[in-house]
Amino acid sequence: MHIPDGYLGPTTCGVFYAVMLPIWVIASKIVKKTLKARQVPLLAIAAAFSFVIMMLNVPIPGGSTGHAVGAVLAAILLGPWAACIAVTVALVVQALLFGDGGITAIGANCFNMAFVEVFVGYYLYRIFSYGSGVSSNRRVIAAGIAGYAALNIAALSTAVMFGIQPLLHKTANGQALYCPYGLNVAIPAMLGEHLLVFGWVEAVVTALVIKYLQKQAPELLEEGGR
């Protein structure tokens, strides 16, 4: 889902930087107040895990890539605001050092993966696991459902960003200045790959890690839930 430079117009890039700036500020303040000292290393591990799993990406027709993100797992373990920070750090490092995602599109990429996916996944997990114990299999299933659904909603958000570019930015004769593919192409291209492949990768990875932590470190699931 990494959007490179040149596929979003300056207006779109600016809007999503403006949207993400207050989210980053709020997330920083909340994390500073609520993150426990023993959770700080986990925040770093979550950022590193997200960075690594996002580097395993596959090009998708239309100018983006498909991959798992690890955002929902981070949200389950740390809460959504800390997960937002963790995924943001991973995306910024990828853009600045590895050219994976454009610098002008950092705001848009963070909106899709560090905000939309994180919060959708976190609250879906809370809904589906509501009332269950830490060791319940329902938590594993809830994690898998949340990972699958949240990744695909983030992919849809990315597709919409691509698809509206021909409407927003075009020459007098109708030629697109940035992403040339409309919604009729961008949405099927993005969602097809994620619904069939990458969503399942996200679901399986998230569910398996939660299952492992239920046995080895259940206290992490209790702290993340709070």
Image (tube, rainbow, N blue to C red):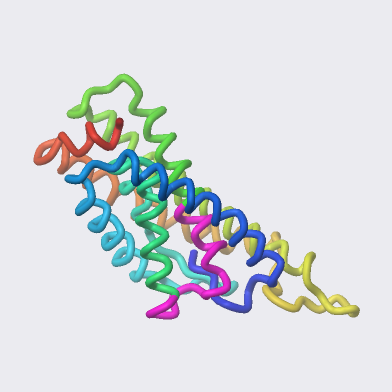
Query: Horizontal and vertical percent for residue 87?
Result: 38, 57
Residue 81, image quadrant: top left
Compared to 174, does 135 lie above or below? Answer: above
Residue reaching furthest left?
216
Compared to 159, does 175 lie above or below? Answer: below
State the residue in front, 166 or 198: 166
Which residue does the image show at 40% across and 63% down from the upper left?
67
Q: Is residue 193 visible?
A: yes
Which residue does the image show at 53% across and 58% down from the upper left?
192
- Number of numbered markers: 0
Residue reaching furthest top?
131
Q: Is residue 152 visible?
A: no
Stretch of the chain drawn in magenta: 96-114
Instruction: Please say whether residue 17 is one of the residues in the magenta stretch.
Output: no
Horizontal side of residue 26 vs 97, given as left or right: right
Horizontal side of residue 157 vs 11, given as left or right: left
Query: Horizontal and vertical percent for residue 188?
Result: 60, 59
Horizontal side of residue 199 vs 137, given as left or right: right
Q: Main secondary structure of the magenta part?
A: helix
Residue 9, image quadrant: bottom right
Q: Quadrant of the C terminus?
A: top left
State the residue in front, 15 or 183: 15
Query: Horizontal and vertical percent for residue 165?
Result: 72, 67
Instruction: Please say whether residue 100 is one of the residues in the magenta stretch.
Output: yes
Residue reaching furthest right?
172
Which residue does the image show at 25% across and 58% down from the upper left?
44
Query: Horizontal and vertical percent for residue 177?
Result: 75, 78
